[in-house]
Amino acid sequence: MPSLDELLRFAADEPDWTQVVHRCAWCGRVATGGGKWVMRPLDLSTATTDGMCPPCGRRNLAQVARRQLRRGRPAA
């Protein structure tokens, strides 16, 4: 079975797909080449990989840490 990297490279080379972009599954922003995360519309031919942008990551990790502290567990 091909690896994720191989699948993404294959998708990026497909003539029907213009590019592969990283999209935050929480807020919908996409990563730019310069490392910024911006809101922008994507057309249907754009392949995306879902992940989490840094602001959503900080916010969600803080929520997890608060929950663990409320339950009496040390934050990771």
Image (tube, rainbow, N blue to C red):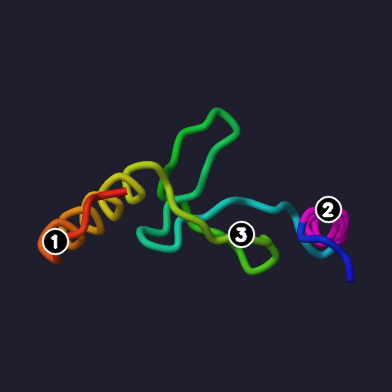
Q: Distance of mark 2 from mark 3, alpha carbons?
A: 12 Å
Residue 14 belongs to the span the image colors magenta: yes
Q: Say which mark, if any, is on residue 49.
A: 3
Q: Residue at x 20, y 59 (%)?
A: 73
Q: Residue at x 14, y 66 (%)?
A: 71
Q: Say which mark, if any, is on residue 51.
A: none
Q: Which residues are magenta?
A: 5-15
Q: Is residue 52 left or right of residue 58?
A: right
Q: Distance of mark 2 from mark 1, alpha carbons?
A: 44 Å
Q: Say which mark, if any, is on residue 9.
A: 2
Which amino acid lies under the numbered mark 1 shown in the image of this protein?
Answer: Gly
Q: Say which mark, if any, is on residue 72.
A: 1
* SS label for mark 1: loop
* CB contact under 8 Å: marks 2 and 3: no
Residue 11 in picture, x, y percent from top left: 81, 61
Which amino acid lies under the numbered mark 3 shown in the image of this protein?
Answer: Thr
Q: Is residue 21 left or right of residue 74?
A: right
Mark 1 or 3 closer to N-term? Answer: 3
Q: Distance of mark 1 from mark 3, alpha carbons?
A: 35 Å
Which amino acid lies under the numbered mark 2 shown in the image of this protein?
Answer: Arg
